[in-house]
Amino acid sequence: MDDLFREFPTLQRTAADIITADDLRARLAAGRPLRIKYGVDVTAPFLHIGHGVNLWAMREMQEAGHKVVLLIGDFTTRIGDPTGKSSTRPVVSAEQIDRDAEGFVAQAGRVLRTEPDLLEIRRNSEWWEQMTVDSFLGLLAHVTHARLIQRDMFASRIAAGAEIHLHELLYPVLQGYDSCELASDLTIVGTDQMFNELMGRFLAERLGRPPQVVITTQITPGTDGRAKQSKSLGNYIALSDTARDMFGKAMKLRDELVSSYLRHYTLIPLPEIAAIDAAIDAGELNPMQAKRILGRALVERYYSAAEAAREEQWFDRVISGRSVPDDVTEVAVADPNATLVDILRHCLPAESASELRRLIAQGGVRLDGIRKLTDPDERHPLSSGDVVRIGRRRWFQIVFR
C-alpha cells in the first residue's frame, strides 16, 4: 500500500486496513472524483480529535479533488447504533436530531472544505422514509441471520443472555444500504464500524452495484488511557475545544499515550516522533516536554502557530507559574453575605448545586490560586476584587455590587 500512502500520506499515520487496496487503485486510475461517505448518527453534536483522524484523511482527498458526502443519519439516529453498547439506546426526538445535526455540520466544517463541489450534505431519511415495506423486505432477503449475529456486540449480548431488539439487529443493513443510495466509492471509519460498512459492500454486490472501498483507522484510548474518547467519560479533546483547553488537555495526558497521540493527531513527521520516543526511553527527554510538543502541534493544526505559542506562554505563566491570568472573567455578585456555593453559581451558572459542592469538597476551589476554600455554606468568604480559581483553568474575579 506504499503507493497509496505516498498519494495520501495522512493514511500512513492512521490506517488499519484498506478493503480493498486494488479497488481503490482502480477508482483513482479512472480519473473521476470519488464520492467519500462520512456518516454520523446525531446522538449529540460532539466530535473529538478521534473523529478528526478520519476527517483529516478526507480533507486530504478533498484537496485532490474528491468529494465528501456528509450523511446525517436522522433516520437511523431514531434506532441508535448498537456499536459497543450492551443495552438498547434511548429514542431521540426529531427536534433534538435537527438541532444536533447543525452542530455536527459546523464541527466537521472545522476540518473539511465546504465548497459545494467538495462537500455534499445528505440525510438518510430521504430514502428510508419513502421506502415501501415490499422494497425493504426485498432488501432483507439478501441478508441472513447467521451473517448478522457474527457481529461481536451481538455475540456478546447472546453470551450474556441479554436482549437484542430487532431494530438493532437490522442496523448494519440500514447503514450498509446508505452507501448504496449515496453511490459511495469509499468510506473511512474506525475499526469498530468495519462490520456495518462491509455490509455496504455486500449489499452493493447483491444489487449489482460497484462495492465501496472501506478504509479503517486505528482507535486510540481516551486521555485517561482506558476507554475510547467519550463525552460522558470526560476523556476527550473536542474539535470545539478552545485553543487553551486543547493545550491544557494535552499537558494532562498520560505519559504512555503521548507517542500514539503524536502519530495519530498531529502532522509532526514520523521520524521526528521516533526520535522523541527514543529520547524519552533513554531518559534524555522528560515526557512533559513531549506533551508540550503535542499541545503545540494540536493547537497549530486546529488554530494557528501563533495561537499555539500564546497558549504555551499562558500555560507557563498561569498554570506552571501560578499567576492570575490577565483576561480573568469578572463576576458581579449582589449579596455580600452570599455563601460560597451561591457565589460559584454566578461563576458557573450551568453547573448544578451538587456539582459545585463536589468541586468544593474535592479542594477544587482556591482563593488567588493558592488557599483552598472548603466550606460551601460559609458566608462572605471573599472580598470584592478577590480572584477565585475553580479547577486548574477557570478563574473569576468577584466584585460585590
Image (tube, rainbow, N blue to C red):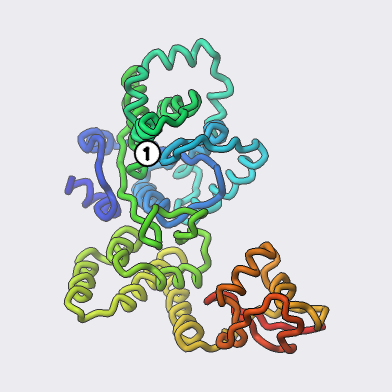
- How busy is the neighbourhood of tag 1: few (under 14 within 10 Å), some, or many (20 plus)? some
Asked if 269 appears above or below 146 in the picture, the reply is: below
Report which quarter residue 333 is drawn in.
bottom right
Residue 55 picture location, percent across and down: 41, 50
Residue in view at x 29 percent, y 54 percent = 10
Asked if 319 appears above or below 281 in the picture, the reply is: below
Q: Quick one: which residue is furthest to the top in this view?
A: 134
In the rendered view, does 305 fall on the left or right side of 242? Answer: left
Q: Amino acid at mark 1?
A: Gln
Classify the position of the C terminus by image quarter. bottom right
In the rendered view, does 75 fall on the left or right side of 223? Answer: right
Report which quarter residue 67 is drawn in.
top left
Along the line of sight, the residue nearer the viewer: 25 or 216: 216
Along the line of sight, the residue nearer the viewer: 282 or 244: 282
Residue that numbered label 1 is attached to:
193
Q: Judge whether residue 184 can be spotted in this image.
A: no
Along the line of sight, the residue nearer the viewer: 36 or 49: 49
Residue 197 picture location, percent across and down: 36, 33
In the rendered view, does 48 fall on the left or right side of 358? Answer: left
Report which quarter residue 74 is drawn in.
top right
Asked if 64 appears above or below 381 in the picture, the reply is: above
In the rendered view, does 281 fall on the left or right side of 368? Answer: left
Residue 26 picture location, percent across and down: 23, 34
Residue in view at x 24 percent, y 79 percent = 285
Q: Judge whether residue 149 can be spotted in this image.
A: yes
Residue 56 picture location, percent across and down: 38, 53
SS of the residue under disc 1: helix
Classify the position of the N terminus by image quarter. top left
Residue in view at x 32 percent, y 58 percent = 264
Asked if 149 appears above or below 105 in the picture, the reply is: above
